[in-house]
Amino acid sequence: MNYYTWLVDDEDDSFAWFLDTPKELMETDYLLRKGNPCKEWFTEGMVFDLSEERGSALTDAIPNTDRLLVVSEKLKDLLERHAPEDSIEFLPVRLRTPEGRLIPQAYFVANVLGTVACVNREESKFTMNAILKDQVGRFQHLVLDEPAIPDGKKIFRLAELRTLIIARQDLAQAIVDADCTGMLFIPLKDYGAEFRSDVTDDDEDD
């Protein structure tokens, strides 16, 4: 089975983004990226302000710089149908335009629960985070140890980089087929390509 990284679609300038963390989350937003349940402390209906520096088109996954999955009701329903029960926690939020208008459409932080330690460390190439010693800072090549992925796991966080969401091919295809917008599914072989050197060892010896 093939797997894809779930990334922000930053290629369409018409898309609405939020760039700033709500002040209620300034000290706790990191908890939403660890794979732990957050419903106990998260304030339902928290308002995320859309940036006036970006477009206004609402997508099914709102692009943002907080590395959060903020999804429409359409995408939430699809994830609930395709992902194993209790694998994602959906936390209701509101979106507000730069003009101060609350958007009526329902949106949710999709908190993907749990992590899977499945990086093939022999075949992958990466550097570790200088501060979070158990986390990868940057991948140049990402290869998964697929036997380590539990059966039926269609979406998960990498234990080695908890902010990175991995989607199985059938789930990614279902999302694309439903015409959901706001995300890019990047094949693992292409993830981190921008950090690879074009110079080979043979070139350096010449």
Image (spheres, rainbow, N blue to C red):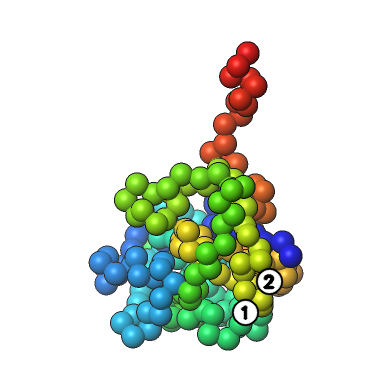
The type of residue carrying mark 2 is Leu
What residue is shown with label 2?
A: 171
The type of residue carrying mark 1 is Ala
Depth check, front residue: 130 or 28: 130
Residue that appears at 48% across and 76% down: 113
**Could you give the CA–CA distance between mark 1 and mark 2, rounded to whole angstroms?**
8 Å
Residue 12, visible in the rendered structure:
no
Depth check, front residue: 28 or 200: 200
Residue that appears at 33% across and 67% down: 29
Asked which quadrant contains residue 134, the reply is bottom left
| Left or right relative to 81: residue 125 | left
Label number found at residue 67: none
Depth check, front residue: 4 or 152: 152
Residue farthest front in this picture: 122
**Can you give x and y, in whole percent of width and height, for residue 2 in the image?**
72, 61
Label number found at residue 83: 1
**Can you give x and y, in whole percent of width and height, for residue 80 in the image?**
60, 83
Q: Which image quarter is the N terminus in? A: bottom right
Q: Which image quarter is the C terminus in? A: top right
Label 1 with label 2: CB-CB less than 8 Å = yes
Ranked by sequence position, the earlier of labels 1 and 2 is 1
Residue 27, visible in the rendered structure:
yes
Q: 180 above or below 108? A: above
**Can you give x and y, in whole percent of width and height, for residue 26 in the image?**
27, 65
Residue that appears at 65% across and 84% down: 81
Which type of secondary structure does the marked residue at label 2 adopt?
Answer: helix
Depth check, front residue: 108 or 115: 115
Q: 172 above or below 203? A: below
Residue that appears at 51% across and 60% down: 164
